[in-house]
Image (tube, helix red, strand yellow):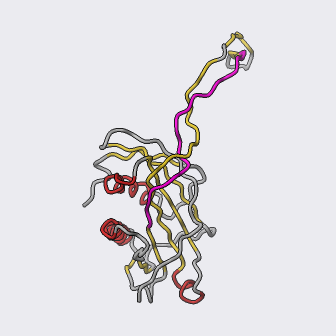
């Protein structure tokens, strides 16, 4: 039986910064648990679903293999789709994402106060208007990887997807760079697997961390 899980409507904003070096990437990650305390405990059976929507079947197979390897190390049992407690599905692609870019922001003139330990003002000084370069959310073409964990028993009984966790990592880049970037995207996905991250997390990923086994 070929089993696929619908993932439409589950994309969410990801912030990141890119890096020119091929041996280093700053990858941003966001994770969300859909149900309180829904992160699956070790020891449950899991089936890593083949994503038939992915055109690059080689990359899709590599990601599935890495997911199975990771889950086995975490104490999960890899099972057939018909008996698994959990389904895990990975999808990847290129497109516009909300990312963290550097943009000039004008700061109005202001008077700043220096205070001592007791809180008393010791000095006031004038700061003229200036331009500061800050990290701000921007929409840019990016490469992304999303991993979903869902309730397999619920899906088999109702035909509906009930997500337990979803996480997505992204990095600015063009679609042709996907094979080289994917190892860097996987690192934060594994690091925060099953965890909720209320804020966007920027992860420094180096070549050694992202090496394929």
Q: Residue at x 71, y 17 (%)?
A: 110
Determine the image quadrant of residue 66. Answer: bottom left
> Which residue, as the protein is rendered here, is positioned at the far right?
120
Q: In this picture, which residue range is highlighted in magenta?
A: 91-111
Task: Tell me if residue 107 is in the magenta stretch.
Answer: yes
> Is residue 54 depicted above or below 107 in this figure?
below
**What is the x, y in percent for residue 103?**
56, 32
Q: Compared with residue 179, is residue 109 higher up or lower down, i.e. above or below?
A: above
User: Residue 61, how many percent across, how many down?
Assistant: 32, 70
Residue 106 falls in which quadrant of the image? top right
Question: Which residue is more in the foreground, 11 or 151?
Answer: 11
Residue 189 % position (x, y): 44, 59
> Which quarter of the image is occupied by the N terminus?
bottom left
Query: Looking at the image, is 156 positioned above or below residue 115?
Result: below
Location of the C terminus by quadrant is bottom left
Q: In percent of the image, x 49 and y 72: which residue is there?
A: 41
**Is residue 51 left or right of 123 when viewed as pictured?**
left
The quarter of the displayed image where residue 21 is located: top left
């Amino acid at each position: 039986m070929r089993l696929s899980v619908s993932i439409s409507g589950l994309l969410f904003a990801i912030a990141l910064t890119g890096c020119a070096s091929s041996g280093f990437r700053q990858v941003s990650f966001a994770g969300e648990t859909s149900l309180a305390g829904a992160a699956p405990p070790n020891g449950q059976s899991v089936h890593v679903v083949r994503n038939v929507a992915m055109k690059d079947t080689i990359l899709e197979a590599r990601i599935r293999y890495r997911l199975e390897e990771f889950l086995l190390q975490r104490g999960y049992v890899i099972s057939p789709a018909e008996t698994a407690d959990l389904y895990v599905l990975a999808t990847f692609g290129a497109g516009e994402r909300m990312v963290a870019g550097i943009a000039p922001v004008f700061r109005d003139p202001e008077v700043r106060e220096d205070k001592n330990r007791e809180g008393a003002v010791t000095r006031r000084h004038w700061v003229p208007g200036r331009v500061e370069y800050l990290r701000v959310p921007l929409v840019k073409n990016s490469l992304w990887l999303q991993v979903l964990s869902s309730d397999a028993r619920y899906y088999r009984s109702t035909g509906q997807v009930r997500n337990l966790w979803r996480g997505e990592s992204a990095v600015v880049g063009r679609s042709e760079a996907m094979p080289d970037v994917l190892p860097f995207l996987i690192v934060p996905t594994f690091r925060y697997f099953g965890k909720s991250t209320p804020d966007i997390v920027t992860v420094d990923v180096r070549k050694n961390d992202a090496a394929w086994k």
